Image (tube, rainbow, N blue to C red):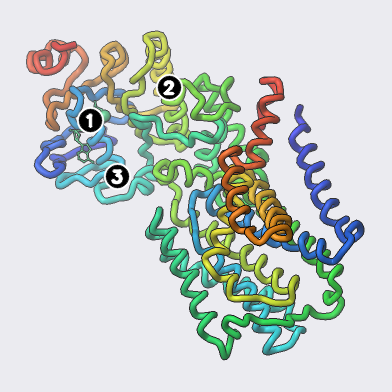
Amino acid sequence: MNAILELESVHKSFGGLQVTQNVSFAVMPGEISAIIGPNGAGKTTLFNQITGHLLPNSGRILFQGHDVVGDSPQKIVAQGIGRAFQIASLFPDETVLDNVKVACLSRLDQTRRFWRPVQRFRRATERAHAILEDLGLEKQADRLAFELAHGDQKLLDIGIALVLEPQLLLLDEPTAGMSPEERQRTRELIKKLWKAYDLTLVFIEHDMDMVFGIAQKVRVLQQGALLAEGTPDEIRNNKEVVTAYLGEA
Amino acid sequence: MKSGPKFSAAVLWTLMILGFALVPVLMRSSYQLNLASHVLVWGLFAVAFNMLWGVTGMLSFGQALYYGLGAYFVGLMVEYLGSAWYLPAIGIGMLAVAATSFLLGLLVIRVGGVYFTMLTLAFGQLAWQITFKWYDFTGGDDGIQGIAAPGFLQNPIAYYYFLLVLVMLSIWILKRMAYSPFGLMLRCVRQNPERVRFLGRRVRRNQLRVYMVSSLFAALAGSLMAGIDNSIHTDMFFWTTSGEVILMSVLGGLNQFFGPFVGAAAIIIIEDIVGAWTEYWSLIIGSIIMSMVILFPKGLVGELHQLKLRMMPPKARRSE
Ligand SMILES: Nc1ncnc2c1ncn2[C@@H]1O[C@H](COP(=O)(O)OP(=O)(O)OP(=O)(O)O)[C@@H](O)[C@H]1O
Ligand SMILES: [Mg+2]
């Protein structure tokens, strides 16, 4: 089987700071995997390079065999890479429903339509409600996005990404800032979505219950370099990882 | 509750159109007709401007450019070719503005933010300079007088109804746009352009579209103004004209579709009352508007809307 995402010796530095150092790994289709590492290890920066928000200094990033380095985020999202952000990236003054609906309209290529009111676009509306249902946000559909609790904003961000039907979905700390109960719920939800939407999923997380609970594979970043890669059990028993990262937790 | 918002929208439209339609019947002098005409033209100009600023977040300080172009196309064509050209000139002016706003838009949208504001201001002032200096062609500081509308439109009341129909039609079109998927996309561009890009949509393309739409209706407003006082002036290009629509939008409420229209009406009426009453009018108008903005930070319509929301039971707030 061919990898869906393949990084080949990716380098990135900000001035003198090496934030990605010779990172190479391959993600298999249908896999659910985690990226862990201390604050500032370069996890988000790695996502930014995969989605075209940052340009690596060198190396290749292959998505379905095609090098996406140099493509704009716009082009990359159209190829099937979706992403939810570390800080939920929403349209704060719009309703929860419209946040999802604008993504549905984009997906259906209806955002240039300028005459009929948004509510009358049946397919987009139905699709938006279905997504909210899946996320458990249906009851909040008519609230403004900025009024939502922090955790629900993060879910909504995932919802927007899901609408675009990505093959590969990147989640940046989906449970950050949530209460233990919310984390539990979100963990179950993400697992459910992974199956229901037939996704390849890569998530960054500091919550170890989530990492060791649902990831099939774990990659550890430290100071921009890939320190270890393996199954949850392998990582748990890796001496280097325990001293560098897990030990402190 | 289902038909609630729709029903009240229909009532508001009817009241507004009826109110304006009755002006010629109820007025005591032609002066009031003139005042109502000014409210309509500025109302359209302000609503069109707010598609740009309030909706999409692009603060242009140069929409006077298009307002002036609309007016001068009518003024110059009637002056040089005769009043039969009055109506065609409105259309030709709008076509010219479509082309101009497309080309200028490509340039000013590239820069964005404060630079967008400054660049639009610069182009507006440039047009003002040219009109001002090119005396032989434009009449310079004298402007153009005696612009006569053709045929029955020479009758002020007929012209008023002509104006009313075009303005209401334009506002209706803009309102449809504001609540369509295109309008939603524009609001999203204002709130989070990065995310719009990551929906696979082009931010600048949408900004260019709304820049053209807004400019087109600014031009229509300008061309309609030419027939109200039968004269036009270089002031229509001046930066204070661009500033005035900004003020109208702020006063009425940026986040409400009809806010700028109400803001336009308020400013014109205040100017009229205070102007007739004291010679220190600009000082007084300034203070009145400043206190209104401080008292009603969401704008007149925004505050009313807020009040309505507060008086409604929470359940009924859905779909507002
Ligand atoms: N645009 C930038 N310019 C300069 N430095 C940056 C930039 N973006 C990130 N950095 C730096 O790169 C390093 C890695 O940041 P990154 O956000 O990728 O960390 P992270 O692993 O996601 O951490 P966290 O767990 O806190 O989210 C940090 O030291 C950060 O300050
Ligand atoms: Mg991060």
Q: Say what amino acid the circle numbered 2 marks.
A: His
Q: Is residue B173 visible?
A: no
Q: Which badge, 2 or 3, comes first in the chain's sequence?
A: 3
Q: Is residue B280 visible?
A: yes
Q: Are marks 3 and 1 in contact (CB under 8 Å)?
A: no
The residue that label 3 is drawn on is A52
Q: Nearer the viewer, mark 1 or mark 2?
A: 2
Q: Say what amino acid the circle numbered 1 marks.
A: Lys
- The residue shown at (45%, 26%) is A153
Left or right? Give the position of A82 relative to B256. Answer: left
- Identify the secondary structure beneath mark 1: helix
Residue A144: x and y, percent?
Answer: 55, 29
Q: Is mark 3 within 8 Å of ligand 1?
A: no
Q: Which badge, 1 or 2, comes first in the chain's sequence?
A: 1
Q: Is mark 1 within 8 Å of ligand 1?
A: yes
Which residue sits furthest right? B25
Residue A230, image quadrant: top left
Chain at tag 3: A
> In the rendered view, would you say B210 is above or below B254?
below
Discs 2 and 3 carry the same chain letter: yes
The residue that label 1 is drawn on is A43
Chain at tag 1: A
Left or right? Give the position of B135 relative to A19. Answer: right
Q: Say what amino acid the circle numbered 3 marks.
A: Gly
- The residue shown at (67%, 25%) is B310
Q: Residues within 10 Å of mark 2 (few under 14, many from 20)?
A: some
Q: CA distance from mark 1 to mark 2?
A: 21 Å
Q: CA distance from mark 2 to mark 3?
A: 26 Å
Residue A185: x and y, percent?
Answer: 42, 12
Q: CA distance from mark 3 to mark 1?
A: 15 Å
The residue that label 2 is drawn on is A150
- Identify the secondary structure beneath mark 2: helix
